[in-house]
Image: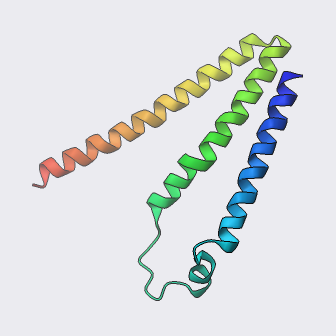
Amino acid sequence: MIATELVQQAWSVLEHAASGALTHVIAGDDLLPRVLAGDADPKGIDTQGIVSFFAGKIAPILLAVLGVIFIGRASKGEISKVLTSSAIAIVGLAFIAGAATLFFVGDYLIQLIFE
């Protein structure tokens, strides 16, 4: 019962956010004409924008889905599955953090060598 209420609340929040985003795109700050006109001299792909989009919009939704799954399993009494899934998620986050750390360490070493 609690899980269904949580999902319904999350669904209404997502609907509200989606309708606000659609209104912003349609009536927003001349975004649509700029997209349709295109850029006369494209500079490349905005990878920073893509990463920030995934980090700001997609990752929280996925984490919320995982949370709902964990809560659902825990309410059924499947604590061992919840603990296993949580441990896998924590190990995955540790790998991502390690990769980010190695990226910065590698960048530092490259700057140190080529200066």
- Residue 51 vs 91, above or below: the answer is below
In this view, the residue farthest toward the right is 1
- Residue at image x 20%, y 45%? 109
Of the pair 76 and 4, the residue shown nearer to us:
4
Quarter of the image where the N terminus is located: top right
Q: Quadrant of residue 41?
A: bottom left
Of the pair 115 and 20, the residue shown nearer to us:
20
For residue 58, side relative to residue 102 (left or right): right
Residue 20 in the image: state x and y as whole percent. Answer: 71, 58
- Residue at image x 54%, y 47%? 55
- Residue 113 vs 98, above or below: the answer is below
Residue 38 in the image: state x and y as whole percent. Answer: 55, 84
Q: Quadrant of residue 7?
A: top right
- Residue at image x 81%, y 22%? 72
Of the pair 40 and 96, the residue shown nearer to us:
40
For residue 72, side relative to residue 29 (left or right): right
Of the pair 5 and 66, the residue shown nearer to us:
5
Residue 14 in the image: state x and y as whole percent. Answer: 75, 47
Colour style of the rendered protein structure: rainbow
Residue 93 in the image: state x and y as whole percent. Answer: 52, 31
For residue 101, side relative to residue 91 (left or right): left
Quarter of the image where the C terminus is located: bottom left
Q: Quadrant of residue 90?
A: top right
- Residue at image x 77%, y 15%? 74
In this view, the residue farthest toward the left is 115
